Image: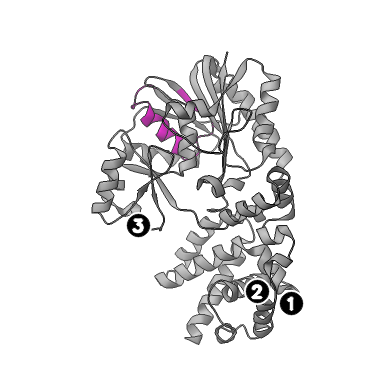
Amino acid sequence: MPAHAHARLRQASALLGQILQFIYPADAVIDQYFKANRNMGSKDRAFAAETVYGCLRHKRELEALYEPIYKPETDAERSRWLAATWLLKYGGWSARALSQAGFTNGAIELVERIRARDLFEFPLAVRANFPDWLAESLVKQFGEQETLKLAEALNQPAPVDIRVNSLKTSREALQAQLLEEGYELTPTPYSPYGLRCDKRGPLFTSQAFRSGLFELQDEGSQLIGLLADAKPKDKIVDFCAGAGGKTLQLAAMMGNTGVVLAFDVSRKRLDRIKPRLLRAGVDTVQRHVIHDEHDPVLNKLAGTASVVIVDAPCSGTGTLRRNPDIKWKPIDLAELAALQSRILTAASKLVKPGGRLVYATCSLLDAENSGITKAFLAHDPGFKIIPADTIMIRHGVAIQDAFTADGSMRLLPQRHGTDGFFAAAMRRE
């Protein structure tokens, strides 16, 4: 057992150290690490992943606990102390187990400090496990108590939400089929297309998935798709399509008629849509790689689209349940906001008179959300807000505390159980 524990601590620390270099996203680093270490058993992999994600979620708190005892001088030491502190506080390890794993210098002192310190003695940013800048921004928006509730929700693992492919089946039929295959899912509380699984499992090896009956998509993202109010034979532009989650949803809402033009600056991301389209039975999507929001190919589409949806590149702060490494990366908010404004302005030119423009982010920050749409509307009076609550009512969706005074929609994990999302729908007069 000591040798086994030693290997597990070493593996988790090494993996965490690679992630904290912030060269690649955490999930990509974990996948690559497991491929390079194929001798790791399934339990060892689960231990490493759980420890790493625990450290990323609670990094600020863990540092506040161990730094008075020892200040690591190298990245390797820092990762090792983070992992050791998490294992003592949240992983069920004792000082003896930690010592047997090779962490002999400081284990007893660390246990005593964890027992002696109450988390409420620390500043709010430490208690929330946020960097200072993010804590300050959220407190300004939500106040201290709501920010702490938000932080608590963000520091929990997210459930697995899927969206039924309405081209092939119904939610009820999919739920029954998955139950027959051994997967128990419940309807999402808001989206009429969603099912939720609270425990991660091999859903994607199911026959239902191979048959194209569902796609992975957070409920909040599904609700943003509803704001597009896509109808059969529409011409829709998914301006920042990424891997195509909303593209597929829009095509299904249109009954596989009309056309969805999926644009993105990354060919690699767009290429991921192709197998998903085949599996879903969708043949109305056209994929286009563009250089940027000013690509000349966009000029040909000016004033022709029924709907343009802009799921803008953003800080990703609304997805911290899934991607806790994001909060520790340096972010240039001013640069992001400038890019978001340019993209929204460029995308708006594609909307035909009477058409709809939807702006959305998976950010919690007003600077990327209402700040962008308010500035856009002030600059272009030809667009008017369509109250998001009226759109949702038409789809039979009632969501408490999700709609703001300016007519937009804001989804929060502590209130709605979704990732954090912002969206605003606008009509071109």
Other residues around mark 2 within 10 Å, as few (<14) / some (14–19) / many (≥20): many
Tell me the tag on residue 81.
Answer: 2
Q: How many marks?
A: 3
Determine whether, in the image, residue 120 is placed left or right of residue 318. right
Residue under circle 3?
Answer: 202
Looking at marks 1 and 3 on the same chain, the residue that comes earlier in the sequence is marked by 1
Residue lying at 71% horizontally and 55% vertically, measured from the top left? 131
Badge number at residue 320? none
Quadrant of res 296: top right
Name which of mark 1 and mark 2 comes first in the sequence: 1
Answer with mark 3 or mark 2, whichever residue precedes in sequence: 2
Q: At x 70% / y 33%, what residue is drawn?
A: 338
Mark number for residue 70? 1
Q: Which residues are magenta?
A: 236-258
Mark 3 belongs to which amino acid? Pro
Q: What's the distance in space between the residues labelled 1 and 2, CA to CA?
A: 9 Å
- Quadrant of the rendered image containing residue 369: top right
Q: CA distance from mark 1 to mark 3?
A: 41 Å
Can I make out residue 40 in this image? no
The answer to whether marks 3 and 2 mark residues whose Cβ atoms lie closer than 8 Å is no
Q: Are marks 1 and 2 in contact (CB under 8 Å)?
A: yes
Residue farthest left in this picture: 180
Q: Position of residue 195 (x, y in %)?
A: 37, 45
Residue 1 magenta-highlighted: no
